[in-house]
Amino acid sequence: MPIIEPAPRLSEEELVGLYGAVGWTAYTADPAGLRRAVDNSSFVVAARQHGRLVGLARALSDDATICYLQDVLVHPDHRRGGVGRALVSAVLSRYEHVRQQVLLTDDEPAQRAFYESLGYAELRDHGTGSLRAFVRFDLRPQ
């Protein structure tokens, strides 16, 4: 199992390599933007094996009422071994005192099952009937 620890600063080369390995080309097309996004995150945790970055999770938070889990990546060679769960657990434990822990993810059954296993519920399944979520994306070509 890789070592999971807070990552105060990751190199641009490491970030582009990991994001590229998982196919997130919208991020790798703008390495400087990716660097800013990670550097400006509230909390970043990394998974390393033999010094190599094999996973990352990051959060944006006001550290009081809301935490957005943003980007959970595990290199394809290290999936299905608990790395993603350990990364998310590290972020959630840092923000366990925060009432709202939110994430957006792809519409894939495996994604849903993974996040549900960590205690997340899809908003429509939350059961309160009084919550809505709205998202706005800039869909212009990059």
Image: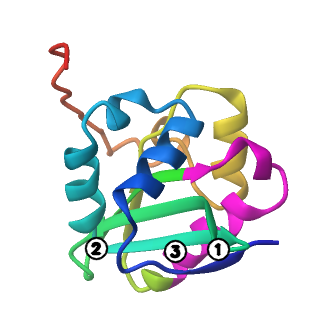
In the image, which is nearer the foreground, mark 1 or mark 2?
1
The colour mode here is: rainbow
Task: List the residue tagged with mark 1.
Answer: 51
* Quadrant the C terminus occupies: top left
Task: List the residue tagged with mark 3.
Answer: 92
Q: Is residue 62 magenta?
A: no
- Say what amino acid the circle numbered 1 marks: Gly
Magenta-colored span:
73-93
- Say what amino acid the circle numbered 3 marks: Leu
Q: Residue at x 30, y 39 (%)?
A: 132
Pick the residue in front: 37 or 86.
37
- Say what amino acid the circle numbered 2 marks: Ser
User: Does residue 67 appear in this view?
Assistant: no
Task: List the residue tagged with mark 2.
Answer: 42
User: In terms of secondary structure, where does tag 2 sit?
Assistant: loop
Distance between the alpha carbons at the discs numbered 1 and 3: 24 Å
Q: Are marks 2 and 3 in contact (CB under 8 Å)?
A: no
Distance between the alpha carbons at the discs numbered 2 and 3: 13 Å
Give left or right: position of 25 versus 92. Answer: left
- Mark 1 and mark 3 lie on one chain; the one further toward the N terminus is 1
Q: Percent from the top left, x then y, of residue 100?
A: 36, 66
Pick the residue in front: 91 or 67.
91
* Quadrant the N terminus occupies: bottom right
> Hey, which quadrant is residue 43 in on the image?
bottom left
